[in-house]
Image: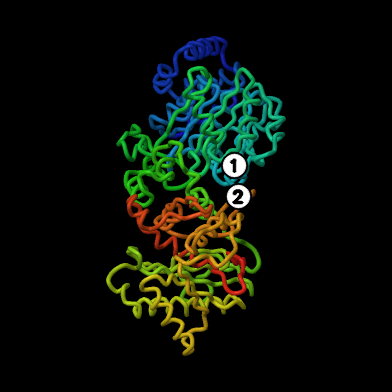
């Protein structure tokens, strides 16, 4: 299905034709949208062009027929297919002042919100309507929402032009008017929402799960007009309970708040899971080629099964991103999944001194970006297959970049000589990389010495003494005390394993600008493991991280890869004691 083209500027038409088209326009607008759509679909192109021209003359926009029909606008004007839940959400915008959508992963939330923006701006005369989009971070507005808006404007032959965060259209007097824009507000800026006024206002709150209570409450002041609407859509937060978004979704279930509705959008609603057919239409989007199916973009059963297997059926991640519900107890995650997501989403550095690993003339094959210079540490973390773990995992940290360099399972991992040989190869590779980057720091190799790890540590230490490598081999007995004074800033870890996990939490906790101290470039299994363990407090007031044994009892895989990553960035105490974490970026 192709997008509807705008009519060319009208030439003089006979009064009888204009009168007839005007009557048809009035009759069609009086019909319910579901009845009107098939009638429009049956019209000949010339008849439709004449109808749109009359609409432009009389209503100030050629799209007035779809003012009460965002579904019809998306399907008939933009030429795009919709599935049942998308229709339900768009239709709700015509009946409710606020539509709250707690949504799972990979369901086209931002794509749908962009279509709502286009519908709103096009079906009102230029200068009488405004759409405003916001999110927790400006990069989400800039790089997620607005590419979808720009594409819809271009592909749908819509009037005006959309740039990075603005859409401008010329009015009847040829004056350029901003009909939509995107912005973000700092969490505690009560004045951020002031000055947003228009007789017809649509507010899109994307990534609504991350919106703070002050900004969230400020949205109510914008919805006082008779024709003001808000679509708040996003994943339920996994690390915050009683968030603004959770309260808004509860309002939508309260019969005493008839102007708010809540429409959950779970991963299990995806057409790729349910088998729902979206007619014979296809998807037109920035990614992919013309003619591909809508469901090809959406989460499928395989992803759901993997998420449950990797995180556990009761994990906050699964509750939020599969079932679109608000987790309870998410605050007990040692490293919240939202922190892990932030680490995964960190952008690569740019500018002088930055280089891609595969351009260094070494054995590096990845195109990850790192900084060159004396302060770029290269460190390795090794989690041998012990304590019930089924994998040998070796991770590496280059400056702020964390990757998993090796995983293997099998009987060979019980031979410490074989494991030490594997680690040695990665040590040599790390040393070559450090030299090429101009680092002046000795490569640090941290090894969990429980079980097989004890022999691995001893052999690598001996090989270092023999000159086979120049790295510093550091023994980490995770069951030992931290050898540091209790520190509230680090949540008073009980043992070294607890300290290692809590240090990782600190490094992955987003700052006010959304950035984290680490860039994670790891696979889905590693990411799941990082957010798996819970934390508790013992009788002495120390923080204790959930053991591998407890995780297995909850049917959650052993976090071998995650612990290798955390081991890479963890610097255990020496005499005299140093900082918990030493990270030089």
Percent x, y of residue 325: 43, 36
Crowd class of label 1 (few under 14; some 14 to 19; many from 20; radius 10 Å):
many
Q: Earlier in the sequence, mark 2 or mark 1?
A: 1
Percent x, y of residue 439: 60, 76
The quadrant of the image that shows the C terminus is bottom right
Question: Is residue 254 positioned above or below 245 on the image?
Answer: above
Question: How far, Cα to Cα, is label 2 from label 1?
Answer: 9 Å
Which residue lies under the disc numbered 2? Answer: 514
Percent x, y of residue 102: 47, 34
Labelled disc at residue 556: none
Asked whether the residues under the numbered discs 2 and 1 touch, taking CB atoms below 8 Å apart as contact, a structural biologist would say yes
Residue farthest toward the bottom in the current orientation of the protein: 466
Which residue occupies the foreground of this view, 215 or 281? 215
Residue in the picture at 41% in, 19% down = 34
Residue in the picture at 38% in, 50% down = 311
Which residue lies under the disc numbered 1? Answer: 136
User: Is disc 2 placed on a helix, strand or loop?
Assistant: loop
Which residue occupies the foreground of this view, 233 or 10? 233
The quadrant of the image that shows the N terminus is top left
């Amino acid at each position: 299905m192709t997008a509807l083209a705008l009519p060319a500027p009208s030439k003089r038409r006979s009064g009888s034709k204009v009168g007839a088209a005007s009557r048809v326009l009035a009759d069609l607008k009086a019909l319910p949208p579901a009845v009107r759509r098939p009638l429009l679909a049956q019209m000949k192109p010339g008849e439709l062009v004449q109808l749109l021209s009359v609409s432009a003359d009389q209503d100030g926009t050629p799209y007035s027929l779809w003012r009460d029909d965002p579904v019809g606008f998306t399907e008939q004007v933009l030429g795009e297919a919709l599935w049942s839940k998308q229709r339900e959400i768009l239709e709700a915008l015509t009946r409710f002042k606020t539509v709250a959508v707690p949504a799972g992963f990979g369901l086209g939330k931002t794509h749908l919100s962009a279509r709502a923006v286009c519908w709103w701006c096009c079906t009102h005369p230029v200068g009488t309507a405004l759409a405003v989009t916001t999110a927790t971070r400006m990069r989400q507005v800039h790089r997620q929402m607005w590419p979808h808006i720009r594409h819809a404007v271009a592909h749908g032959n819509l009037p005006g032009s959309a740039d990075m965060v603005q859409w401008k259209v010329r009015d009847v007097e040829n004056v350029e008017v901003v009909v939509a824009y995107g912005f973000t507000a700092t969490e505690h800026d009560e004045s951020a929402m002031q000055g947003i006024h228009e007789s017809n206002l649509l507010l899109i709150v994307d990534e609504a799960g991350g919106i703070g209570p002050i900004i969230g409450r400020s949205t109510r002041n914008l919805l006082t007009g008779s024709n003001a609407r808000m679509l708040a859509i996003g994943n339920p937060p996994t690390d915050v309970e009683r968030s603004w978004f959770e309260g808004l979704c509860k309002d939508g279930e309260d019969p005493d708040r008839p102007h708010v509705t809540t429409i959950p959008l779970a991963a299990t609603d995806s057409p790729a899971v349910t088998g729902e057919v979206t007619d014979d239409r296809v998807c037109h989007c920035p990614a992919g080629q013309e003619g591909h199916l809508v469901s090809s973009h959406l989460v499928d059963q395989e992803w759901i099964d993997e998420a449950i297997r990797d995180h556990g059926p009761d994990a906050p991640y699964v509750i939020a991103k599969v079932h679109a519900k608000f987790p309870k107890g998410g605050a007990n995650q040692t490293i919240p999944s939202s922190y892990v997501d932030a680490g995964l989403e960190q952008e690569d550095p740019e500018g002088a001194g930055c280089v891609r690993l595969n351009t260094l003339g070494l054995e590096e094959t990845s195109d990850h970006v790192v900084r060159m210079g004396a302060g770029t540490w290269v460190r390795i973390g090794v989690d041998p297959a012990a304590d019930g773990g089924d994998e040998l995992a070796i991770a590496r940290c280059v400056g702020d970049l964390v990757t998993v360099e090796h995983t293997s399972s099998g009987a060979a991992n019980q031979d410490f000589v074989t494991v030490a040989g594997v680690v040695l190869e990665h040590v040599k590779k790390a040393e070559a990389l450090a030299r090429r980057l101009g680092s002046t720091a000795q490569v640090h190799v941290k090894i969990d010495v429980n079980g097989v790890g004890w022999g691995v540590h001893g052999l690598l230490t001996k090989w270092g003494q023999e000159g086979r490598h120049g790295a510093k081999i550091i023994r980490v007995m995770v069951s030992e005390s931290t050898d540091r004074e209790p520190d509230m800033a680090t949540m008073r870890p009980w043992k070294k394993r607890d300290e290692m996990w809590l240090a990782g939490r600190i490094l992955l906790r987003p700052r006010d600008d959304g950035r984290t101290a680490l860039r994670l470039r790891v696979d889905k299994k590693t990411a799941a493991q990082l957010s798996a363990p819970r934390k508790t407090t013992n009788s002495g007031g120390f923080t204790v991280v959930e053991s591998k044994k407890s995780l297995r009892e909850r049917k959650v895989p052993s976090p071998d890869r995650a612990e290798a990553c955390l081991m890479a960035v963890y610097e255990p105490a020496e005499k005299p004691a140093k900082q918990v974490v030493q990270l030089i970026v």
